[in-house]
Image (cartoon, rainbow, N blue to C red):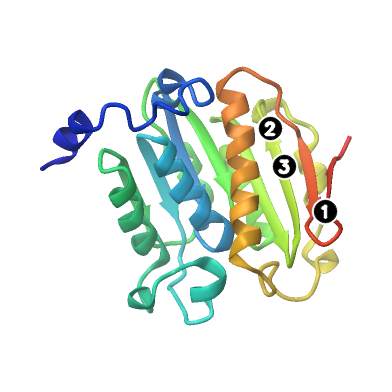
Amino acid sequence: MNAIEMLAAHPDRDIRQREIVPPEKLAGCYVVVVGVGAIGRQVALQLAAVGAASLELFDHDTVGVENLASQAYWPQDLTRPKVDATADICRLIYPQVRLIAHPTRFRRSFGRSLGDAGKDVAVFCCVDSITTRGLVWESVRDRARFFADGRMNAEVIRVLASDRPGSDPYYATTLFSEEQALVGSCTARSTVYTACIAAGLMLGQFTRWLRGLPVERDLLLNLLSMELMAVQ
């Protein structure tokens, strides 16, 4: 059974989300995920589950043993490119997805060629370097209609979102220098449940944008204190 036949056999796969995730709006999106580590892998899988039809993944890294628990990769994925392992699961979840996987670092030049004609570009930035975040932002902001950035340190999550990246003055203020960053990767201490929550918050902002609702530009969630704050 091919992908079209599978969809024909399951026309109501999205029936419980249609009032929350408008199918026609989602079908008009071209979604890009930069980084498929802890948060990005979960973002990609959730996007496939909701039925994102056009998906592009970027990550230069391969699966290591330290990624099995915190990023939910499988033992058989060890040494494989993360984008390939993630793409395989996305296709199992949603066989119709048109997916391109790039086992390479995101480069500034990629921003000029993202998307399909007539589709709105939505970008999920899920990297662990503040320098790379700045590069992604500057590369895609003039093309993207929606942008979300997920950051995680142990059990503290920060999600930034913009529904007008081209004219957004706020996001750039969150890009501090590498010298100001904590020593070590922001995912040096991480758990899969924190990554899943971060991904869910990002998808929540994405679906608000699809419905024409305002997005929260800066959310901070501390799981230890169980505090959720919208930064003004």
Query: Rounded to the nearest whole Å, what is the CA distance between mark 2 and mark 3?
Result: 7 Å
Secondary structure found at label 1: loop
Secondary structure found at label 2: strand
Left or right of residue 102, residue 110 in this image: right
The three-letter code of the residue at mark 3 reads: Leu
> 10 Å neighbourhood of mark 3: few (<14), some, or many (≥20)?
many
Q: Of circles 3 and 1, which is in front?
A: 1
The mark nearer the N terminus, 3 or 1, is 3
> 10 Å neighbourhood of mark 2: few (<14), some, or many (≥20)?
many
Task: Name the residue rendered at 64%, 63% in the picture.
Answer: 128
- Quadrant of the frame with the C terminus: top right
Q: Which mark identifies residue 72?
A: none
Query: Rounded to the nearest whole Å, what is the CA distance between mark 3 and mark 1?
Result: 19 Å
**Which image quadrant for residue 192?**
bottom right
User: Contact (CB < 8 A) between labels 2 and 3?
Assistant: yes
Task: Name the residue rendered at 18%, 39% in the picture.
Answer: 3
Which residue is the extreme one toward the left? 1
* Residue 206 coordinates in the image, percent (x, y): 58, 33
Q: Which mark identifies residue 226?
A: 1
Q: How many marks?
A: 3
> 10 Å neighbourhood of mark 1: few (<14), some, or many (≥20)?
few
- Which residue is denoted by mark 3 in the rendering? 160
* Residue 91 coordinates in the image, percent (x, y): 29, 49
Secondary structure found at label 3: strand
- Which residue is denoted by mark 2 in the rendering? 162
The three-letter code of the residue at mark 2 reads: Ser
The mark nearer the N terminus, 2 or 1, is 2
On screen, 12 above or below 24? Answer: below
Left or right of residue 143, residue 231 in this image: right
Closest to the observer, 180 or 113: 180
Task: Name the residue rendered at 33%, 47% in the picture.
Answer: 93
